[in-house]
Image: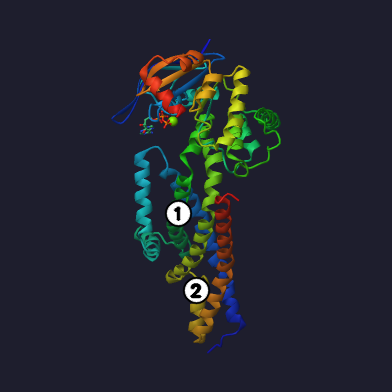
Amino acid sequence: MRTFGSPEFLFIVYALRWTLSLTVLAFVGGGIMGIVLALLRIARSRTLRTITSFYMQVIQGLPLLVLLFLCYYAPSLFGIEIAALTAAAIALTINSSAFLGAIWESALRAIPKAQWESADALALTPYKTLRFVIAPQAIRLALPSTVGFLVQIIKQTSLASIIGFIEITRAGQLVSNATFEPLKAFLSVAALYFAVCFPLTQFSLWLERRTARRGAGT
Amino acid sequence: MSVVVAKNIRKSFGALEVLKGVSLTVEGGEVVALIGRSGSGKSTFLRCLNGLESVDSGEIEVAGHGMSRKPAELRQLRRDVGIVFQSYNLFPHLTAGENIMLAPVQVKCMGKDAARAEAKRCLALVGLGDRFEAYPDMLSGGQQQRVAIARSLAMQPKVMLFDEVTSALDPELTGEVLAVIENLARDGMTMLLVTHEMGFARRVANRTIFMKDGVIHEEGPSAEFFSAPKTPELQAFLRSEVG
Ligand SMILES: Nc1ncnc2c1ncn2[C@@H]1O[C@H](COP(=O)(O)OP(=O)(O)OP(=O)(O)O)[C@@H](O)[C@H]1O
Ligand SMILES: [Mg+2]
């Protein structure tokens, strides 16, 4: 039997790149989809808005674990083998898209209608209004919650361990099984999550304070 | 030449008919004041003139552009029509200068340097030549409103619409904004302004119009309009405004 030493610890640390890769995939994929969703939610067409809202509510109401199982097992019904990373990336992307879409939608809605009107009156096209007037303000508003949700994604990647993807939680489990020292193994895992998430949380809080200060007009 | 022609404009919000056939012509260089009680449809009429509200019936021609529902044609019209609102509505993430440069650069495809020069010229025109780099939240209400006027002027509009532009300001700040408008009048800008400042309307406007219940109730050259109002309704309104 092995004891918990630095090779075991390093094994967990190396798995961090998979946690981070999965996070980046989910954040970028979910971000791109989220932008589209947020824009569809403020579109002229009522049909588009309703369909988008339905999609977002379904995804938000679905436990991520269930979504993960669906993404992992559904393709095999069609005879497609799917890698755990791919399944996890797809599930996390879909999940993030709904939440980021909602965050950004409310930021877009928080910009006063008068801003759209003023830009309209200056003969700007809707696209240019969005790009130069609305989006810069909405991004500033949404930044703290967006960074906050990034922290959620990092933690959510741990669910991918269940379909056998070796990120840090799964690595901790493997080390724990091999060494029978679950406490050391999972404390290492926890420390790694903390090391990544804590600075981001602080950053998010700082952004929030900054936004609040600007809002107060100082 | 007529810069604004509105014929028999009707407009309802749901069951509420706000404009019940308003006709108005404003000649080039003319300054027309629009007064009336709250809810009489002044803002709605002004907003119809640059297509921020669509009309139910009637004809509008502004600066030679017929009113259109097609976005591209509407933008052509709006390039020639400046509008300033009660609540300034500056873009808070842009400096005063950037606020003014945005439309010339993005709509008229003016070069950055030319736009910057134009923005400086317009800021100087409203007495804020030294506040190019200031963000809106660093400016007083009166200064913000003057930047908003400069932002409209930078598009070199053929007509300016003002909707109670001093109503949100402290009394000591209204003067500086009214002075800017008066200067524009002197320079020959065609203007249509909704206002509660009766003294200002009387002094600056060539013609004043009293709106009541969605129609033009009385109008006339400002001097006579204020000194000898004909209808009892206008007489009552003027009494109530003077206090
Ligand atoms: N978008 C809208 N939807 C529904 N009703 C509206 C809308 N805009 C204006 N109204 C109504 O139309 C009427 C006329 O409004 P308008 O703003 O034109 O009046 P006003 O003469 O400018 O008054 P004020 O002096 O208060 O600015 C009011 O009863 C108002 O409630
Ligand atoms: Mg009004």
Residue B212: image x %, image y %? 37, 23
The quarter of the rendered structure image containing the C terminus of chain B is: top left
- Ligand 1 within 8 A of label 1's CB? no
The residue located at (53%, 81%) in the rendering is A185
Assign a secondary structure to mark 2.
helix
Residue B136: image x %, image y %? 60, 41
Q: Earlier in the sequence, mark 2 or mark 1?
A: 1
The residue located at (38%, 58%) in the rendering is A60
Residue under circle 2? Answer: A169
Circle 2 chain: A
Q: Mark 2 is on which residue type?
A: Thr
Q: Residues within 10 Å of mark 1 (few under 14, many from 20)?
A: many
The residue located at (45%, 45%) in the rendering is A109
Give whichever of B71, A210 is nearer the camera. Answer: A210
Assign a secondary structure to mark 1.
helix
Residue under circle 1? Answer: A97
Q: Is residue B233 left or right of residue A193?
A: left
- Quadrant of the displayed image that contains ligand 1: top left
Task: Mark yes or no: residue B45 visible.
Answer: no
Instruction: Name the front one of labels 2 and 1.
Output: 1
Residue A153: image x %, image y %? 49, 63
Q: Mark 1 is on which residue type?
A: Ser
Q: Are marks 2 and 1 in contact (CB under 8 Å)?
A: no
